Image (cartoon, rainbow, N blue to C red):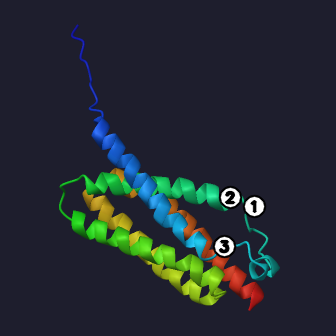
Amino acid sequence: METRTIRQRLPDLGSILTAIGFVLLVNLVGAAPSAIGSPNTPWFRALEKPWFYPPTIAFPVVWTLLFTLLGVALWLVWRSDAGGRRLALGLFAAQMLVNVVWTPTFFALEAPLAAFGIIVVLWVLVLGTILAFRRVDRRGAALLVPYLAWITFAAVLNFELWRLNA
């Protein structure tokens, strides 16, 4: 009987360090808006919250996990030479920009309805990014699915915060 050895090619140290750099970059960009606005304001604390509002600790934990997944996904697409890579990277940058705009709009401007409009645009961009990533690297696309789920939840939460306090 013949024994076959299956060797998986592991990324080299340089690739691993680059992936870590992407993860750190996405987390830094994602966290930057918290310097402009956050839920630690009298205005936000006074808002009526829907029954499904998560515990406060959930937000930094979930966002760190999601931004880490986004960083790995971005690294996978960035290192690919597949067709559609530029479009995928452009959509990723666009959705990150829109993501960054949401926090100051909601918290600093105290504009939940405008923030809801932004999160709807973000949802569409994230879906487009997933579809574009799928053409380049299916793993990268799959890593964005939890992000889309959270954005969906956040959109519902944003809408309810507006509705309850309008």
Cα–Cα span, label 1 and label 2: 6 Å
Q: Which residue is mark 2?
A: 58
Q: How many marks?
A: 3
SS at mark 1? Answer: loop
Residue 16, above or below 42: above
Q: Is residue 83 left or right of residue 6?
A: left
In the drawing, does residue 85 fall left or right of residue 20?
left
**To which residue does mark 1 refer?**
55
Furthest-front residue in this view: 35
The spot of residue 83 in percent (x, y) is: 17, 62
Q: What residue is rendered at 31% in x and 59% in y? A: 134
> Dot 2, crowdedness within 10 Å: few (<14), some or many (≥20)?
few
Residue 73 in the image: x percent, y percent?
A: 38, 55
Query: Which residue ends up furthest to the top in the rendered image?
Result: 1
Label 3 sits on a secondary structure element that is loop
Residue 55 versus residue 146: which sits nearer the camera? Answer: 55
The kind of residue tagged 2 is Ala
Image point 59% across, 76% down: which residue?
36
Residue 148 makes an appearance in the image: no
Q: Amino acid at mark 3?
A: Ser
Instruction: Find disc 3 in the rendering and name its residue.
Output: 38
Q: Tag 3 or tag 1, which sits nearer the N-term?
A: 3
Tell me whether the residue at label 2 lies in contact with that at label 3, contact meaning CB atoms closer than 8 angstroms: no
Q: Residues within 10 Å of mark 1 (few under 14, many from 20)?
A: few
Q: Are marks 1 and 2 in contact (CB under 8 Å)?
A: yes
Q: CA distance from mark 2 to mark 3?
A: 14 Å
Q: Is residue 36 above or below residue 131?
A: below
Q: Quadrant of the N terminus?
A: top left
